[in-house]
Amino acid sequence: MTRSLLAAALALALAACGTEPGRKLQELLQPSKGQAALDEGLRQYEDGAYAESAKNLQGAIDQGLTDAQRAEAHKHLAFIHCASTRERQCRDEFRKALAVDPALDLAPAEAGHPIWGPVFRSVKAAR
């Protein structure tokens, strides 16, 4: 009986793969190819190693990420560009993040940042 239930659950999960909930389930169960590079890039960002972080974040995007991960990577790339006074690239990365996740918002501490907070709000309002 247990094998039958397992087979039925697997068949149902596979059938749902084409739906949004099915894709979300796949994202949870199967790590993306760029997951390790994303994790390393975010760790480097937190440590203040921005040049290395940017390389890993871009590498993670190039390797393949889920939509949520891709939005997170683009958001952090935007932070790096803004902090480095590259406003055009900052805006471009925020646009990419919002294209992947139109509902993306910054955390309160991020939104209150004097450099990228206003840039993000401007890009989001222009959508």
Image (spheres, grey):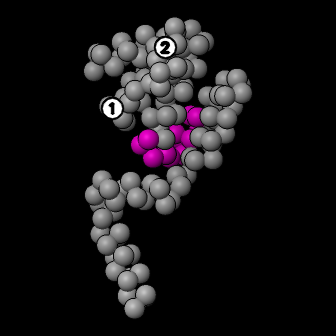
* Disc 2 target residue: 112
Residue 13, image quadrant: bottom left
Q: Residue at x 47, y 21 (%)?
A: 108
Amino acid type assigned to the residue bearing label 1 in the image: Ala
- Image location of residue 74, percent across then percent down: 49, 30
Q: Which residues are magenta?
A: 57-68
Mark 2 surroundings within 10 Å by alpha-carbon count, few (fewer than 14), some (14 through 19), many (20 or more): few
Q: Residue at x 34, y 80 (%)?
A: 8
Name the magenta segment's main secondary structure: helix
In this rendered view, identify the residue nearer to me: 80 or 111.
Answer: 111
Residue 47: name its quadrant: top right
Residue 114 located within the stretch drawn in magenta = no
The residue tagged 1 is 103
Give neighbour class at mark 1: few <14, some 14-19, many 20+ (Cα, 10 Å): few
Q: Position of residue 23 (x, y in %)?
A: 36, 56
- Classify the position of the N terminus by image quarter: bottom left
Quadrant, the C terminus: top left
